[in-house]
Image (spheres, rainbow, N blue to C red):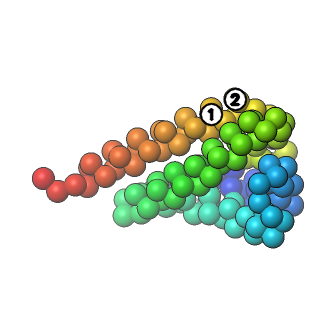
Amino acid sequence: MAAAGAMKAWNPAEFLIAIERYELVPGWLALGASFYVPWLEIAIAVGIWPRGFRRVATALAIGLGLVFVAFTWSAYWRGLDVKCGCFGAASDGGGVTAAVRASLFVAVGAAAYWSLCRQTRPN
């Protein structure tokens, strides 16, 4: 997540184009997301390390992942061929592969969150 965030933060204009290709949000929201989402991804990646922030960082990652899942499945169902934009110019194609992969990442994140919650639960 840190690498993906860093690549997007390095070139927010390229990430803006990727967001706009999904045709789901108005331009002002895409512009804001192109600047803030990369830094959120970097903050989440850093927040996973300290024990006190893991649940919050994992929950934020799941939330961000769910938004991305919605974007990728929506693009697939509407027949849009959109590169995910995850790693800037190095991003691979979209389609059902990207949608399934994003869904699996969210499922793994949800399992990690569930595990974190069970570990900190008092007996």
Asked whether residue 70 is in view, the answer is yes
- State the residue in front, 40 or 83: 83
Q: Residue furthest left?
A: 123
Instruction: Say what amino acid the circle numbered 2 marks.
Output: Thr
Which residue, given by chain and number where applicable, does mark 1 sit on?
101
Q: CA distance from mark 2 to mark 1?
A: 6 Å
Mark 1 surroundings within 10 Å by alpha-carbon count, few (fewer than 14), some (14 through 19), many (20 or more): few
Mark 2 surroundings within 10 Å by alpha-carbon count, few (fewer than 14), some (14 through 19), many (20 or more): some
Taking the spot 40% from the left edge, 57% from the top edge, the residue there is: 55
Q: Indicate left or right for 56 with 34 as reference.
A: left
* Percent position of residue 5, x then y: 68, 55
Q: Indicate left or right for 44 with 99 as reference.
A: left
Instruction: Say what amino acid the circle numbered 1 marks.
Output: Arg
* Percent position of residue 108, x then y: 48, 39
Taking the spot 62% from the left edge, 52% from the top edge, the residue there is: 67
Asked whether residue 18 is in view, the answer is no
Taking the spot 63% from the left edge, 44% from the top edge, the residue there is: 69
Which residue, given by chain and number where applicable, does mark 2 sit on?
97
